[in-house]
Image (spheres, grey):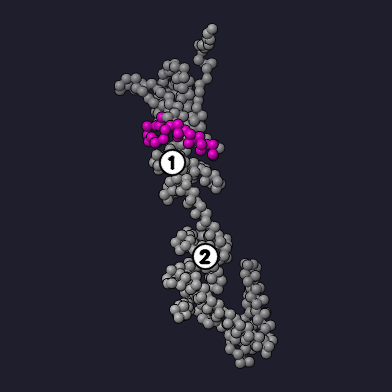
Amino acid sequence: MSFIKQSAENFLIFDTRVENFFISEYMAKAPGEYVKAYLLGLMYAEQGLPLEDADIARELGMSAPEVSACWDYWASEGLAEKHPRSPGSKDCDIEFISARERFYGRPARSRSRIDLQDEELRKLYEAISAKTARLLDAKAMEEISSWLSVYKMSPELVLCGYDYCIEKNRSTEYKYVGRVLKDWKAKGLDTPAAVKDALEAQDRDYALYRRVFRALGFTGRNPGEEEKRIMSSWQSELGFGEERILEACAKTAGISNPNIKYVDKVLRNWYTEEHSAGERSETEIMAAVNVLYEEDRRRNEAEVQARRKEIYAKLPRLEEINSEMKDTGFRISKAAFMGENGKATIARERSRMKRLSEERAELLKKNGYAPDALDMRYTCAKCRDTGELEDGSRCSCYGEKLALVRSRSEG
């Protein structure tokens, strides 16, 4: 038994296969008349039937030069090749090139070849399309192939770039992914493993930035590039852990303008001292110096409390004035957050604060007390018994205490 399929003589009952690549990437941008000529020529080519430019011109209402220009256009797009029928002849046969072949198996003459085998490249395109849930267009394919051939990226690195953008809810357009990948390459990150290690380190840095900014009371803004560089150096260069860094941040409590450079100076001073501490451990040295400052603060606090108790017993009005001044300062701070609506309140309360201050000074003077009798008297007025100045540098008294600690250790 044999099988016979009846052949059809009228080619108009057949279908002409038009690739989706052509429809999505070429048809919309091409002149309408060129698309018509392309489709008509493709139909005849599929059936192996002859068709001259003059026939196309007559059927589509075009001129012969327009038809010739049409084939020049499709040749420039890489979807057709013109083969002269004889040397020097203007008459050409047209070979149609599939859009799929153009990208997967037959790169255009102007496009450099890539190092991957065609099947591997096809799998990469398919994997990217699956991750992004959309088909790659011609420009995206061309760009991706350049990542492999020009930038020497591996397919695994390319897929890693797409995974990263998807995970971070970033754009998966090829231009954005390309910027991510090129940035990785510039940093020497050539493998997914290297990228993973770098991203984990970056996450640790960002976590530190957030903790430091929160500790310093910075809200409403992100750290600048220089601030990031400085904060990252505390771990990578100086080797401090988060606990010590936050301890340094706490040192800003006594200054009027907390800032990253202040904390940096504190940490670098600690680093220098700890690495030149000699036989005694740096932890012991620091602890001993801090004990001396703590002793100063406790002694001075006890003295001011005793003085206040004595003065308030003789002059109760002074205690009332101090309480009123605290309440007035609170109202001024609260009004500052009201913008224009708080200006009148601020002016009124500042005037009240001035009157109270003048009354307190007068009472102290009349009763034979110094103007600062109710104030804390520090052992070192420059650093207020903290060891650090406003700019984060060590106070001169720190060297004195350090010398004292070392002399006691040697003794």
The mark nearer the N terminus, 1 or 2, is 1
The x, y position of residue 76, in whole percent, is 40, 31
Which residue lies under the disc numbered 1?
A: 154
Report whether 320 appears left or right of 10. right
Residue 366 horizontal side relative to residue 59, left or right: right
Quarter of the figure that contains the N terminus: top right
The dot on residue 245 is: 2
Identify the image quadrant of residue 316: bottom right
Look at the image and tell me in which quarter the C terminus lies.
bottom left
Magenta span contains residue 126: yes
Q: Above or below — where is 342 with respect to 16?
A: below
Inspect the image, locate mark 1, and give the three-letter code of the amino acid beneath it: Ser
Residue at 30 percent across and 21 percent down: it is 87
User: Magenta residues, as a range?
Assistant: 106-132
Label 2 element class:
helix
Picture mark count:
2
Q: For residue 195, which numbered disc appears in the image?
A: none
Residue located 41% across and 35% down the image: 116
- Disc 1 to disc 2: CB gap under 8 Å: no
